[in-house]
Image (spheres, helix red, strand yellow):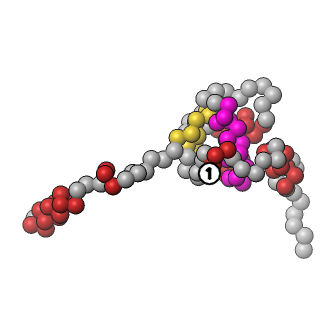
Amino acid sequence: MTAGPALPGRDDGPDRLYTITGGRSRSPENAFDLVTLIVAERQPAPGMQSEHARILRMCEAPIAVVEVAAELSLPVSVVKILLGDLLESGAVTARHPRFAPNKARLPDLDTLKQVLHGLQRL
């Protein structure tokens, strides 16, 4: 049994991915994770690589890296390389999720104990 015919114009083989990324295999400085929000800062320019132009149109409103990859039907690693190009040129900005870097932001343990005791007395 053979697989059905490929869709016209769809070739996700290694040659196509190599061409899209210009032979690169890593994004600069690993600037993105899956949930980094990408926002376009400008409109696509004439003569721009088609994938870059599609990303800019897609990112008019904030969108996560993983959603961009899904929409383009490309591997996340390839999308990160393309986003790196756009980030370096200032065409997009990346908004990273914020995490509490230290315990200083956590409530004091004594305060939490007092709240718990107060709730138990109710």
- For image coordinates 45% across by 47% down, the residue present is 98
Q: Give the percent coordinates (x, y) of residue 16.
A: 85, 49
Residue 111 against residue 65 in the figure, above or below: below
Q: Is residue 11 left or right of residue 83?
A: right
Task: Tell me where residue 51 sits by quadrant.
Answer: top right
Q: Which residue is mark 1?
A: 66
Residue bounds of the magenta highlight: 71-89
- For image coordinates 70% across by 38% down, the residue present is 85
Most foreground residue, 25 or 42: 25
- For image coordinates 67% across by 41% down, the residue present is 84
Residue 63 against residue 89 in the figure, above or below: below
Query: From where the camera sits, is residue 15 visible?
Result: yes
- Does the segment drawn in magenta span residue 84? yes
Which quarter of the rendering shows the N terminus?
bottom right
Q: Is residue 19 left or right of residue 103?
A: right
Q: Amino acid at mark 1?
A: Val
Most foreground residue, 20 or 72: 20
Among all residues in the image, which is located at the extreme left? 121
Task: Tell me where residue 45 sits by quadrant.
Answer: top right
Q: Give the percent coordinates (x, y) of residue 39.
A: 58, 36
State the predominant SS element of the stretch in magenta: helix
Badge 1 marks a residue whose secondary structure is helix
